[in-house]
Image (cartoon, rainbow, N blue to C red):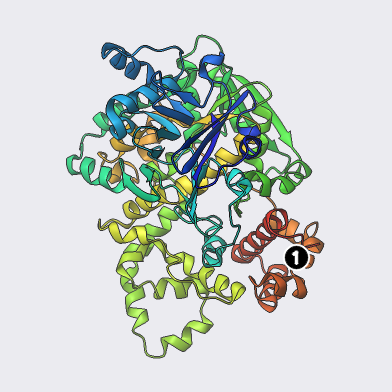
Amino acid sequence: MCGICGYIGPKAIEEEQLWKMNNTMYHRGPDDGGVWQFQQGDIQIGLAQRRLSILDLSEMGHQPMLSEDQRYVLVYNGEIYNFQNIRKSLEKKGYRFQSNCDTEVILYAYAEWGKQCFLRFNGMFAAALYDRKERKLILARDRIGKKPLYYYVYKGHFVFASELKPIMEYPYFEKKIDKSVINHYLCNKYLVAPFCIFEHTYKMIPGTILEYSFGKVTTEYYWDVLGQYQSYSANKENSFAICKKSVNKILQDAVAARLVADVPIGTFLSGGIDSTLITAIAQRNTDTPINTYSIGFYDKERNEAPYSAEIAKFLGTNHHEHYVREKDIFDLIDDLSFYYDEPFSDSSQLPTMLVSKYASQDITVALSGDGGDEIFCGYKMYDWTWVAQHADFLGAIASCVPGMGSLKKKLPPELCAFISNRKKDKKTQLYIDVMIEEADKLTGRKADNIKYEHEKRLTMKNWQERRMLLDMQTYLPDEILAKTDRASMKYSLEVRCPLLDYRVIEESFKIPHQYKYHHFDKKYILKEITYDYVPRKLLDRPKKGFGVPLRKWLRTVLKDEISHYADTAILKRQDIFEPEAVKRLIIHQEKSDKIMYSSMLWSFYVFQKWYQMYIEDLW
């Protein structure tokens, strides 16, 4: 796990400046750092990396890493779990290795197979490789988007980094907010790739390769969620027993591969299905008790720690339980802007940071259960999607009622969204209409295409399957995985996700949907696998999740700060938000318990905190 950055441009920058860019990501890699610069013709190239040592802790894993013939230079962030097998194949072809790390394997895999090498990798990665002979830079991001990668391209400059901070430190970066994406952020709490908060700046889309050569950018998919779904779902396996056995077998291998490290390792154990299954398999793969971590809340309605403790006791793990007070969570708010780089307002990032903090005191690698909900149909939203599809005819009838346009003003916003949900290529995104309307008021701009265009490619009849595939391309990489990456890397902790092994994803596409959503029972097949490891009685309960008392904070301890950020003079100077609309939102949030208002106001607050840090002092 590391942080990488680099540039290609018409002007050289001082090595000290490249180090400055690199060291903004010190938290991602406190063990080592390196830079490399090279003049080639009329362009200057620089690559840099911060290293968190996981495999081969020696200096032989130092980056940037050059091939023996000096043609290729590589910086890389992540882990390739099958690198030993790939290494053996390369050794048979005559390649000789100096280290025992996966970085060198990537270097020579590219030398042998070119861009096709990325299809051979099973892991999480963001890699940048410069080919001095071809004079081109290759960027690649893992299939599902575990590891982040940003890039900036403007006026002959190309800059890339694991986070936005190094790009902002590049001396020729023009830091201008892209106002067209702010409504997207307010509605979704994050920005989906390729969009970014700054102009001319982008997130790489998962499963893609980018080539930059002679000022030209080209991108291509080497692995695409929809393409894999279409391929594997064409041959459904109708036997539940065979499906269950296949998923279990792949998961066992995926967990075992992610237990390989030269540093202490453990698991997050929330007490839910996903983390319990991963922990159970991990414990079976080790001879000694594995370290497990959970946090507890003194608020009983949000506290799942007792369930985690029961499961840990049954599995025989070395369990670590940390109870946190509201103040412990609140005190992390000021860190959000620095570690998340751009506005990101999923409040569960705060407890995720806390569990990462406590785990990092003992371990350097943690396994998590991320991905189970999107792949095996686990979210409450999928229930609502089922209802929306089966009641859609009622919405169609209601939309034709004379005078419905004026009647909508008297109906609840959620019902209006259901009635207005007539676009065939956006059917599964109906409930975001409520947020869109509020965001339009808040910015005074009606943004186009807030709903994801990805759904146009999803033509399957089952809305749940469509929504799951949509989430795999948007919500999973740009919200769930981004949240976990930044929260864990704040404490130099690597998080690995066995459920997001690409083989698990592809196998899930072969499973009939009724084995995932079985008579309103979500994640049915995953639960049945888990019950073979842990008694049903320890897991058969509603999920609570990482709750944060947003409404309370917005009305009390954050009230004065929000009022300042909502000052008319400040808002007019910013020219981003409508002062009167912000004031109305604050009033609505004070009087109403609707999630929409607290969510939107929190997003406004997080944006202003970010703006304060990176753009202008608002005080």
Q: Secondary structure at mark 1?
A: helix
**Residue at the spot 75% in from the left edge and 70% down from the top edge:** 570
Looking at this view, is 403 or 12 the one in front?
12
The answer to whether 380 is drawn above or below residue 45 in the figure is below
Q: Is residue 171 left or right of residue 39?
A: right
Please count the marks in the image: 1
The answer to whether 119 is drawn above or below residue 334 in the figure is above
Looking at this view, is 574 or 270 the one in front?
574
Q: Position of residue 337 (x, y in %)?
A: 67, 49
Q: Position of residue 249 (x, y in %)?
A: 33, 23
**Residue at the spot 34% in from the left edge and 37% down from the top edge:** 505
**Residue at the spot 46% in from the left edge and 50% down from the top edge:** 475
Q: Quadrant of residue 507?
A: top left
The answer to whether 28 is drawn above or below residue 260 in the figure is below
Q: Position of residue 12 (x, y in %)?
A: 56, 42
Identity, as a three-letter code, of the amino acid under mark 1: Tyr
The residue singled out by tag 1 in the image is: 565
The answer to whether any part of residue 10 appears in the image is yes
Q: Residue furthest top?
A: 287
**Residue at the spot 61% in from the left edge and 36% down from the top edge:** 22
Looking at this view, is 362 or 325 the one in front?
362
Label 1: few (<14), some (14–19) or many (≥20) C-alpha neighbours in 10 Å: many
